[in-house]
Amino acid sequence: MDFRASKMCWPFTLVCCLTFLLAVTPQVFGQASSAQSNKSRNLSLQSVPNGAKMKFRGVVISRDADTFTIRDRNRADYQVLLTDSTSIKTNGGFLRFGKKYPATDILRGLIIEVEGRGDRQGQLVAEKIRFNESDMRAAVTTDTRVNPVEANQERLSGQMDELYTVAEEARKEVRVANERISALDDYDVQETVTVNFAVNSTLLSLEAKRQLDTLAEKASAAKAYMIEVGGYADSTGNEAKNFQLSRQRADSVIQYLAVRHKIPLRRFVSPMGYGETEAVADNKTAAGRAQNRRVEVKMLLNRGLNTRASTTSTVKP
């Protein structure tokens, strides 16, 4: 009887042991990953074989100067490399071509389809990136300058597709991160330049060009940098016109830096036009309005990479 009882108890004991291991293992690995978050993040990336052609759909969960991380519907993360030849467009409909977008508009929270080949570092070198206009509008609401809107949350909550669930999870992570940073994750503002414009004008003055030339020289000597550009207007004219004018001023600055100084477009954070908001001076005076007709240009440096570079340079051979 004792032998039979022990045989009957063995399966139950085995199930209990397996249940305990399954419950404890995630906690143990979770503690280890929190202690080495950066290392774990790199190790969690899926490697793409060198030369292998891949095409998949996923959501952008992080963005750097030249790369971004995409998570597919199976929750596998890949690092994607942007180049000057990467084709970035919206999906075109019947007899309609997609709209082209710059690399700066690859935002966190954007659902995309990416196609490319693997390189020696295990990254996917993007050849084509496609997405829907509606997904771009949804991603913009989680950018560093825009708070999420209720309508977007309702639209996402009704989606049953698992990929949209992953996208919403990533967007929640972005919103939490945005509460802790003033510019971009892991980036510090190294240099700020403000250039001013004449009334109802988007043309750069000689002084403005001189200021941008100085900034470009510093950027060319930096590593892992990005440039954030924001345009503004005074209170003259209607609100819609001021938003358009402020965006055009930001585009003028980017065009000058890209053409004159050969700064790749992927180095620019998605430009914004803020209209007459965030005035720095009184719009009731001519001098105040002149100060408000401006574009603010910020050079951002990757905190981790530049810290390691400076530490290495101080080590004596």
Image: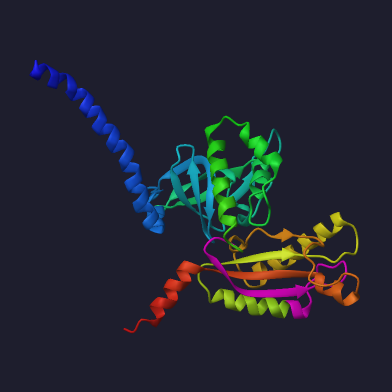
In the image, 3 versus 37, the foreground residue is 3
Query: Residue 295: x, y in percent?
Result: 74, 69
Residue at image position (64%, 70%) is: 298
- Write down the quadrant of residue 280 in the picture: bottom right
Q: Is residue 202 magenta?
A: yes
Query: Residue 110: x, y in percent?
Result: 59, 46
Query: Residue 150: x, y in percent?
Result: 70, 41
Residue 301 lies left or right of residue 317; in this view the side is right
Task: Please state the total of marks drawn on the protein image.
Answer: 0
Q: Is residue 121 visible?
A: no
Q: Is residue 114 visible?
A: yes
Residue at the bottom extreme of this rendering: 316
- Write down the quadrant of residue 237 in the picture: bottom right
Q: How is the image coloured?
A: rainbow
Residue at image position (71%, 64%) is: 230
In the image, 140 versus 66, the foreground residue is 140
Query: Residue 166: x, y in percent?
Result: 53, 40
Q: Which residues are magenta?
A: 184-208
In the image, 51 versus 201, the foreground residue is 201
Residue 13 lies left or right of residue 169; in this view the side is left
Check the image and report above or below for 96 versus 247: above
In the image, 129 versus 74, the foreground residue is 74
Q: Is residue 144 magenta?
A: no
Check the image and report above or below for 17 versus 243: above
Residue at the front extreme of this rendering: 2
- Locate the N terminus by quadrant: top left
- Write down the quadrant of residue 240 in the picture: bottom right
- Locate the C terminus by quadrant: bottom left
Residue at image position (45%, 73%) is: 307
Check the image and report above or below for 199 versus 177: below
